[in-house]
Amino acid sequence: MKLQLKVSDMSCGGCVSTITKAIKTVDANASIQCDPKTKIVLVETESSESAIKTAIAQVGYPSS
Ligand SMILES: [Cu+2]
């Protein structure tokens, strides 16, 4: 499943790294593209959208 999430608080490489790690804890095989300029996170994953969103919210990045 491909997800496109808008993460408004993602602003630098540190955020990208934190978000990437959080998603990997849910699905280690997820393919993740984060763009701090557009605030868009693209995730290709076997996990559910709610599981991914919960994981990144837990590290401080609410998404929509
Ligand atoms: Cu940052």
Image (spheres, helix red, strand yellow):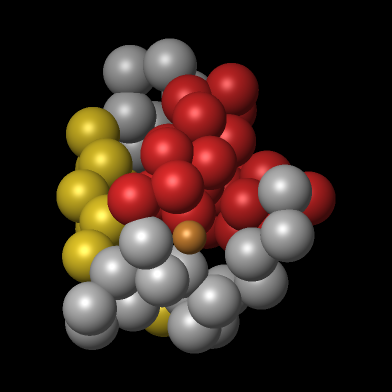
* Vertical arrangement, residue 31 with respect to residue 44, above or below: above
Q: Residue at x 37, y 61 (%)?
A: 12
How many marks are shown on the rendered structure?
0
Image location of residue 30, percent across then percent down: 32, 29
Q: Is residue 30 visible?
A: yes
* Vertical arrangement, residue 38 with respect to residue 14, above or below: below
Q: Residue at x 64, y 64 (%)?
A: 61
19 relative to 38 in the view: left or right: right
27 relative to 41 in the view: left or right: right
Q: Nearer the viewer, residue 34 or 14?
A: 14
Q: Is residue 1 visible?
A: no
Image location of residue 1, percent across then percent down: 29, 47
Q: Quadrant of the C terminus?
A: bottom right
| Quadrant assignment, res 32 | top left
Q: Nearer the viewer, residue 11 or 19?
A: 11
Residue sitting farthest toward the right:
58
